[in-house]
Amino acid sequence: MSDGPDIATVLASVLADDGGSMTPPIVQTSLFAFDNYAAFEARMAGDTDTAIYTRVQNPTVAAFEGLMAQAEEGEAAVGFASGMAAISSTLLAFVKPGDRIACIEHAYPDTYRFFERMLRPFGVQIDYHPARAFEDDPDLLNGVAIAYLESPSSVVFTPMNLARVAEHATRHGTVTMIDNSWASPVFQRPLTLGIDIVLHSASKYISGHSDTVAGVVVSSHAHIARIRDLTLPLLGAKLAPFEAFLLTRGLRTLKVRMMQHQATADLFVDRLAAVPQVRRINSPGANAVPGLTGRSGLMSIEFDDTVDIPAFADAFTHFRLGVSWGGFESLVLPARVALAQAGEHNSLQAFGVSPNLVRLNLGLEDPEDLWADFESALSASLT
């Protein structure tokens, strides 16, 4: 994988045409007027790409999309109102009744629910497989329309050799999609490894400030054009100009934030190895698989039965209880709370996850303060 473009350099080039402004202007409008009939007719005929309506096109959004395409080394990108809007809109643009989807096990819970509660009733077959099966079985994707991937996967953070999976997919004509929110383009660029489509919950590391809900998809011109033609306008889950402005702000500091998240995660992984109550640490590091060049701040820990999980969660000072991740703040999320909802579609049993598993989002606070907080909470929770 190449080192890729420097995001700050890309940002400067994208903004160079904006009259010297160091931030992209927020074009807060719902529609764009035309100077004359000929210009209007040309746009409606598709002969020009002039902005016409913010549900499908906006200059502020386009600036962010251009940055993301370059950061992921793709040809084009399209923004959405949330990560799930990006996931569902992309899947619906490429799947039809009767198709088969091969999905990584331990996928993001709402992705799993979308498969089970919406796609399966419409006649789409979904099968779940471990990362090793995607890597080692060259015929796993035979007859499969879409391979839906995460590397690492949610909750247990299993990494995957994406280049090998892409080779198998190409052989069978399978479209590959991956949620790259965990690594961000700083630590992993799946398109350079042969994956077809990259998705992000931009609410996470891309934003980095816990003040934006958004999603983005990066791929080839042809794939993005398909999404823009079908699901973006018809489902209407567009990215708003102000959110696009905030995401561009987040991209300015993405690399430095990711390096700090990694430094804190490295400290935790090293010290957790010596904690007797820890059975397993789920946190793949640099070079765990080809193409993964760093470790983000999201990990999970499986404790033994001597740890009272509710008491542990309640004993923190700096860590807060909450969903989501990728922001400046540190969070703790017990798996038994996150996954024991909505019956069979979001249960510990469905995901094969231990009730003693806890997910940590390591934020940008002082690493030593966070570790002292962890040790104190653990001490208070021992039975």
Image (cartoon, grey):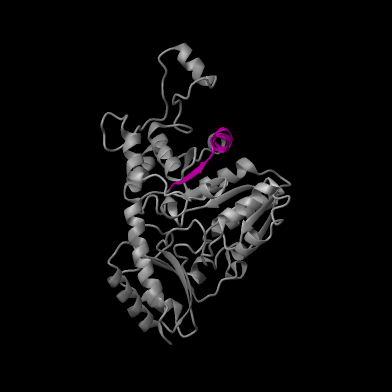
Compared to residue 168, the image places residue 33 above or below, namely above
Query: Which residue range is magenta in the image?
Result: 214-231
Magenta span includes 219: yes
* Residue at 39 percent of width and 44 percent of height: 5
The reply to whether residue 362 is visible in this rendering is yes
Looking at the image, which is closer to me, 137 or 27? Answer: 137
Q: Quadrant of residue 68?
A: top left
Looking at the image, which is closer to me, 40 or 259? Answer: 259
Compared to residue 313, the image places residue 237 above or below, namely above
Picture coordinates of residue 210 (x, y %)?
36, 54
The reply to whether residue 114 is visible in this rendering is no
Picture coordinates of residue 80 (x, y %)?
47, 42
* Residue at 52 percent of width and 37 percent of height: 236
Looking at the image, which is closer to me, 102 or 83? Answer: 102
Q: From the image, which quarter does the C terminus lie in?
A: bottom left
Picture coordinates of residue 49 (x, y %)?
47, 25
How many marks can you see? Answer: 0
Direction from residue 50 to residue 16 in the image, left or right: left
* Residue at 44 percent of width and 58 percent of height: 293
Compared to residue 265, the image places residue 24 above or below, namely above
Picture coordinates of residue 325 (x, y %)?
41, 59
Single out the residue that lies furthest toward the front: 2
Compared to residue 283, the image places residue 102 above or below, namely above
Single out the residue that lies furthest toward the bottom: 383
Q: In which quarter of the image is residue 308?
A: bottom left
Magenta span includes 271: no
* Residue at 50 percent of width and 70 percent of height: 335
